[in-house]
Image (cartoon, grey):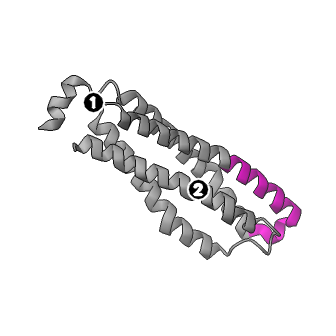
Amino acid sequence: MSYAELALGASNVLLGSAVGAGVNHSIFVMPRWFSSPPGSLPEVDESTRSLRAFWAPISAGSALALGSAWALNRNDPRRRPLLSVAGGLLVATWAATAAYFVPELFRLIRSGHQLGAEEVARRGRRWRNLNWARLGVLAGISVLAAAAAERRPARGIRRLLQR
């Protein structure tokens, strides 16, 4: 197995894990957080620990694996376009996460008692609905990486990869 194949495999595993964990979080954790706000919201320390312990490494690992897959397949005309689109979409999801998802979640957790139950519930529903769209894009990125892995390397590239 070549490094290009290994990087594609790693990106598929990590992206699939991120999608699965995100769906799990959206189905089982987030509804509890917004079930009866503000009392049902987690403590700030609990949320920050979760972000650092799980989401930061899996996000960084996904980006590193996808970036490596792109770099190792950049000369392959069959894989490069798929990996380029996947990388662009990953950057877009990171931008959305940094601009809206993380700050809004922390705003709700930190000031939930001051906003009132109805406002927290309304904003929590909007956050969850938009998060489903973000997970859909992340699933699309995973599908693009899987499609790139499924394509055989171009003929001229195979000789280089086998060395």
Between residues 12 and 40, which one lies in front from this camera angle? 12
Where, by quadrant of the figure, is residue 149 drawn? top left
**What amino acid does circle 2 point to?**
Gly
**Percent of width and height locating residue 2:** 22, 42
Count numbered badges in the picture. Answer: 2
| Residue 149 horizontal side relative to residue 123, left or right | left
Of 85 and 103, nearer the camera is 85
Categorize mark 2 by other alpha carbons within 10 Å: few (<14), some (14-19), many (20+).
Answer: some
**SS under mark 1:** loop
Query: Which residue is under mark 2?
Result: 22
Q: In this view, does 100 lie above or below 21?
A: above
At a point 78% along the width and 68% down the height, the residue shown is 112
Point out residue 64 in the picture as x, y percentages from the top left corner: 36, 50
Residue at 27 percent of width and 38 percent of height: 72
Q: Residues within 10 Å of mark 1 (few under 14, many from 20)?
A: many
Instruction: Please give the residue where the numbered disc 1 appears in the rendered image.
Output: 153
- Amino acid type of disc 1? Pro
Q: Distance between the residues labelled 2 and 1?
A: 31 Å
